Image (cartoon, rainbow, N blue to C red):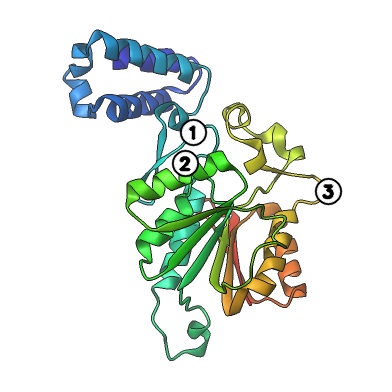
């Protein structure tokens, strides 16, 4: 199978531009061929085994399996993150959350008192529901003075996260913890920052989602009950009341539908300096609050 054959087949289920982009990515990642190489016809020189592998990739893509799962990796904040069916594919919105944290983590104390309140002195960071470890790895690399710990309930996800930390050469401590049941977790460690991209999609929103997400990504990392969409945020914020240092921060990726409810909840729990932030699409996608 050649590049042209692949994208033409994929155009049956994707628009032409996306089909070409997916095929280019497949040939670059799996066979090391750049777009220039493809234009020069080097895809026609692949071995019989590589040609068969390209055909297998195409077959999986035709079933709308995300290309990141097919290739086993995704790009995130300059890191190549291993992914499989046990973890969510990292999203651009989550990159924005990391950049927000990193930007504040690198700020220097300013004489303006309002700006002072935004300074994050990150010595101990906890990433709850780490999944692939993309947030933990990114923060550990960008804020090397910080001690980063990451939790997940899934042993399979933690295997992926550990491998991503190893590949990126950053120290992260991984622990299997259920974020809805932290009563048994020792409170000897006081965190300066807790970050989470928890499940936040209600089941009633399924009809609006793409089948490639619904059919392939882990539902436990996506969905929350329709009658309690804030359950993970509430549990983490309650844990933060005990485990965050005074002046420490909570950072979350959020469902824009519940931004106002989250703000009200954090206020009622005596958090302050609450701020929401829009993503690149103009949706309220992030929130932070200070203890």
C-alpha gap between disc 1 and disc 3: 30 Å
Task: Please provide percent x and percent y for residue 228.
Answer: 80, 51
| Residue depth check, mark 3 versus mark 2: number of the one nearer the observer | 2
Residue 60: which disc?
Answer: none
Task: Please provide percent x and percent y for residue 142.
Answer: 36, 62
C-alpha gap between disc 3 and disc 2: 31 Å
Asked whether 187 or 46 is in front, the reply is 187
Residue 227: which disc?
Answer: 3
Task: Please provide percent x and percent y for residue 53.
Answer: 34, 15
Vertical comparison of 31 with 213: above or below: above
For the residue labelled by badge 3, is the local secondary structure a helix, a strand or a loop? Answer: loop
For the residue labelled by badge 2, is the local secondary structure a helix, a strand or a loop? Answer: helix
Query: Does any portion of residue 134 appear in the rendered image?
Result: yes
Tell me which label, 3 or 2, sits earlier in the chain: 2
C-alpha gap between disc 1 and disc 2: 8 Å
Quarter holding residue 278: bottom right
Quarter holding residue 268: bottom right
Write the residue at 24% across / 28% down: 32
Asked whether 154 or 43 is in front, the reply is 154
Asked whether 265 or 238 is in front, the reply is 238
For the residue labelled by badge 1, is the local secondary structure a helix, a strand or a loop? Answer: loop
Q: Which residue is mark 2?
A: 160
């Amino acid at each position: 199978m050649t590049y042209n054959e692949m994208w033409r087949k994929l155009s049956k289920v994707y628009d032409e531009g996306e089909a070409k982009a997916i095929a280019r990515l497949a040939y670059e990642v799996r066979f090391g061929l750049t777009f220039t190489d493809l234009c020069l016809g080097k895809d026609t020189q692949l071995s019989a085994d590589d040609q068969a592998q390209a055909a297998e990739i195409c077959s999986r893509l035709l079933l709308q399996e995300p290309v990141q799962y097919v290739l086993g990796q995704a790009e995130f904040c300059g890191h190549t993150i291993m992914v499989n069916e046990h973890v969510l594919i990292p999203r651009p919105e989550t990159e924005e959350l990391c950049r927000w944290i990193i930007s504040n983590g690198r700020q220097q104390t300013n004489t303006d008192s309002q700006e002072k309140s935004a300074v994050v002195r990150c010595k101990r960071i906890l990433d709850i529901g780490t999944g692939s470890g993309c947030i933990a790895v990114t923060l550990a690399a960008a804020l090397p003075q910080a001690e980063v710990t990451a939790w997940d309930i899934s042993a399979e996800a933690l295997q992926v996260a550990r491998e991503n930390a190893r590949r990126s050469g950053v120290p992260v401590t991984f622990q299997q913890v259920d974020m809805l049941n932290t009563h048994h977790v020792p409170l000897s460690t006081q965190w300066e920052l807790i970050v989470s991209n928890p499940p936040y999609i209600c089941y009633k929103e399924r009809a609006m989602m793409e089948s490639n997400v619904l059919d392939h990504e882990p539902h436990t990392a996506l969905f929350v009950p329709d009658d309690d969409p804030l359950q993970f945020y509430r549990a983490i914020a309650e844990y933060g009341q005990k485990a965050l240092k005074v002046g420490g921060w909570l950072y979350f990726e959020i469902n824009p539908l519940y931004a106002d409810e989250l703000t009200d909840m954090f206020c009622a729990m005596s958090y302050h300096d609450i701020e929401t932030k829009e993503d690149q699409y103009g949706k309220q996608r992030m929130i932070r609050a200070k203890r």
